[in-house]
Image (cartoon, rainbow, N blue to C red):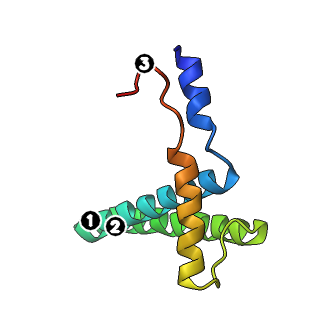
Amino acid sequence: MGIRDMIADMRKGMNDHVLSNSMMGSAKALGTAYLAGAFQCATPEIRRMFMQFADRAVQAHAALTELCLRKGWHQAYDSPDVQLKDWYSISTGVVAVDPGPERRV
């Protein structure tokens, strides 16, 4: 199995919903890192710069959240039970990628 086959197998479970969720997680981590940097920083100018970067990350996350809600990828007002069932279904589709005969144990 070549690298192209491995990438094709990895992409089988990927769709816009899964990718948007990954992007939202990345934006959250980025904002958290900049905010932590701002709290750790003693220099006011660098602290202000980190806070501006954190604000941009929050804006990007908000725009992505709006897109996800508009496209119906996320249902923010469903009951927690329904949300958990949806995410379980999505996650099993992503991790169900066949690793190929060389990697089976």
Q: Secondary structure at mark 2?
A: helix
Q: Which mark is residue 12?
A: none
> According to the image, label 2 marks what residue?
47
Look at 69% across and 52% down and name the residue there.
16
> According to the image, label 1 marks what residue?
43
> According to the image, label 3 marks what residue?
102
Q: 80 or 30: nearer the eye?
A: 80
**What is the CA distance from the residue labelled 1 to the residue labelled 2?**
6 Å
Left or right, 49 with reference to 68: left
**What is the CA distance from the residue labelled 1 to the residue labelled 3?**
53 Å
Look at 50% across and 24% down and name the residue there.
100
Q: Secondary structure at mark 3?
A: loop
Residue type at the position of mark 1: Thr
Residue type at the position of mark 2: Arg
Task: Confirm or deny contact between disc 1 and disc 2 (CB under 8 A).
Answer: yes
Q: 104 or 16: nearer the eye?
A: 104
Look at 52% across and 18% down and name the residue there.
3
Q: Residues within 10 Å of mark 3 (few under 14, many from 20)?
A: few
Res. 65 image quadrant: bottom right
Q: Is residue 10 above or below residue 60?
A: above
